[in-house]
Amino acid sequence: MKKNKTTISTIINGRDCDAIVDDNLLLADYLREDLGLFGTKIGCDGGECGCCTVLIDGTPHHACLTLAAKCDGKTIETIESLSEGSRLSAIQRGFNEKLGAQCGFCTPGMVMAAEGLLRKTKNPTETEIREGLASNICRCTGYVKIIEAVQFAAKELSKRT
Amino acid sequence: MNEIKRNQSIGVPKPLVDGPEKVSGKALYSGDFVPKNCLVGRIMRSPVAHAEIINIDIIEAQKLPGVKVIITGDETDEPFGILPIARFEFPLARDKVRYRGEPIACVVAVDVETAQAAIDVIKFEYKELPGYFKSKEAMEEGVVDLHEHRPGNIEREVDFELGEVDAGLADSDFILEETFNCAEICQVQSEPHAAIAEFDVERQFMTVRASTQVPYYDHLMLAKVLKMDESKIRMIKPFVGGGFGCRTESLNITLICALAARAARGTVRIVASREETFITHRGRPETDIDMKIGVKKNGIITAVDYTAIQRGGAYSGYGVVTILYSGGLLFGMYDLQAVRYKGLRVLTNTPPPGAMRGHGITDVRYAFESLLDKIAGQLNIDPIEIRRKNYLKGPNYETLNEMFINSYGLPECIDWVEKESGWKKRKGKLGKFKGLGVGCGHYISGASKPVNWTGEPHATVHLKLDWDSSITILTGAPEIGQGSSTMATQCAAEVLGLDMSRFQILTSDSKLTPKDNGAYSSRITYMVGNATIDAAKNLRNILIEAAAKKLDADPDDVECLGEFYTAGSQDEGLTFEEVVKAALEGTGTITVSGNFDTLPESWGTKKYRGGAISGSMAYAYAAQVVEVSIDPDTAAITVEKVWAAQDVGKALNPLSVEGQIEGSVWMGMGQAISEGTEYHEGLAITNSMLDYRVPTIVESPPIEVGIIETIDPNGPFGAKEAGETSLIAFIPAFTNAVADALGVRPLDLPVTPDKLMELIENKKEE
């Protein structure tokens, strides 16, 4: 089917990405199907679960509620950016070691939401963690260990500065 | 020389062996496989709840550019279903549709939009029949039967009396009766259903990847509906984003995907939307319970008499098993000497429920524990004390339905939550609109009789030892996020005394791994854990033999220290690598097998039909205390804190056990406070994660976990079930806390603020 298209220039995980995309292409589908960045998951029919959370210009967004065509000039970070070429990041280690991930499907979105939170708030209170992750649904953990994972990461990161 | 110690893996908190993949986004789930030239399948679903199919006209749709093939119910006349006695569901409906959203056709096209455009022009002609959306409606006189062979829309009626119930009631000082309605709920696992099927036309060979808890049953059902030889199918389970029971039977999406791939002579993927995942369902059925309990003045239970009616949806699924669990699993918690149960599983024009976490017993246990709490109140006995009075006289206890209880940690669980919650000091003293409640639960550690009786062992595990001194665990056991791969690795590492890093694990690929029945009924730790231990012992024996030969010693004198084998303090001993080289001499790569079988005494009772259901090798126990506060103006409930103790036999991985208990408590909370499906004329109006309200991180409580270890005599290192029992205990603990806070008792689930407000208002009027 013939569709309207838009040219976009983005920086995705530190790389320049120029593309011509269909106007109705969702950022989540662009990342997954066009770029093969399958770390970003789709768990619902739009804006309900948070599995597709990515950072756009440093702030968490639902990639399933964002049109790729509207991302021209933006910097996008996905789960793949956090550990590329190196070891797990502090947040990723927190989720791994504290068992913040069970089935793992919500984890990339959860980790990116936590990443966004910790960039803004260095030592979040438990309430701030709850608020920061309120758009992300996990069905396995009951969230207890997710909170512990974020607290672990905040502590690790504060040691570095 | 430094003292060499065996590595310890059991009882040590271990992150998941597949954790790094999950936290880095490298883990690939079924929907993440998108090979080049892959086609997409999209399912057309019935717009009506009950109708005879007259015609499905696909002629116009097939002409659309980009449409590869369209299949309908004509594609296969082989029905599927989990239970051999109840297989009458077709991947794509034939003759009739029986629920709104039932698949009737699948379009295979180059992309989703093309497929949807084709669906839009398919003409579905049907003759509508009356739809029955509630159990009662479906059972009325003169109804149209959903299935010819199920007259009156009764899927299964269970009726048993064990002990003398009428005498027990007559002998009691006090009889209390209540009716409860528990809403139908869904698992809402994070990953929507997905499948990708590749048909190799040259070899007439099918490879399927799907989000499943039971790849082996998928394999069986694929062969059945495709009418293909089982050996011509390869079933692979990639990473799976949770299940909680909705994937414990073959789902139509997987079967349709394979049928579509064969028809398209290529590779087809179907990724279900969240709405379709809700429609595919297999959650917990709506259950109406009427329960009567007789007690003596001292709180001893003399008899229980109850009925459970389940809205079973349009197809059987696990329905027969669910309604049997609702009866059989009343036993094994308390010392019950007289029980009468009548269960009805009803067929309705709604999507079929299945085997959700806490299968069959959750709602019944909720009713029982609520009633017990109410009785305690009326007899002026502490709710914890009334439970103590009715403990099993065990361990080594046999229930009326011949369940053998070999380890029984309920007393320790109760003691723990009583102490940690400050029950004695705080109960009744928290102030207005605040309350504490207690509730208990138990659950099986694997069904002792498998669904498909083949005579094979319940579990088989292979260990492959190769020249590089690494060991690969090969198991069909599906890792779905519950940590089974980590558990198996721990078991093997413990027996061999090696560090877990020496092991790799490969799971659920039917051409590589030994067959496994799957992730359901909390069977994996118990059964696959034991099979892994057996395999590791067999491998250890081979290594000891090889070491003995090399050291010129008697095998009985050889000590395995994991990384080091020695025959007494005098010799220099051998490193693990040296032992491996010695063992492989002459034989090459070694693969050993280990098995597990259940004991016949655990196969359940023959006193009533279906009595095998609820027979298990071991039962896990849980007790919880829940603290709530309620806003009197809005009736909004806050769960302030949960104390959750579970007897898991032995916590093989305390980190994972904690995670399972916390997750169970939380999922129980969802069912208790907010979750429930709703239908309007068969149209589900809660098919999104906004309309179907699962709790978010904001309203999720702190949970304090108490791990109780009773060391089950037959469990792997003494372990039992860890992932379901605590869900069951939460719900009554919660409603009992609400009753404590308000003086009115919610009976229907979920306890939403509007329902609770009504109870509060009614009380004021009294």
Image (cartoon, coloured by chain):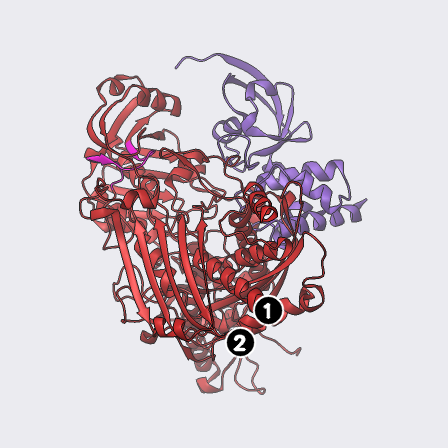
Chain of the residue under label 1: B
Figure check: B537 above or below B196: below
B305 relative position to B435: left or right: left
The x and y percentages for residue A159 are: 79, 49
Question: Considering depth in this image, is B322 or B130 the residue closer to the camera?
Answer: B130
The x and y percentages for residue B292 are: 42, 63
C-alpha span from label 2 to label 1: 10 Å
The x and y percentages for residue B321 are: 33, 57
State the residue lying farthest toward the right: A161
Magenta-colored stretch includes residue B732: no
Q: The residue under label 1 is which amino acid type?
A: Asn
Q: The residue under label 2 is which amino acid type?
A: Asn
- Chain letter, red: B
The residue beneath circle 2 is: B298
Chain of the residue under label 2: B
Determine crowd level at label 1: few under 14, some 14-19, many 20+ residues with C-alpha closer than 10 A: few
Q: Quadrant of residue B277?
A: top left
Q: Residue at x 34, y 33 (%)?
A: B101
Q: Give the residues in magenta.
A: B90-104
Question: Which dot marks residue B743?
Answer: none
**Residue A102 is at least partly visible in this image:** no
The overriding secondary structure of the stretch rendered in magenta is loop
| Secondary structure category for the residue under label 1 | loop
The residue beneath circle 1 is: B380
- Chain letter, purple: A
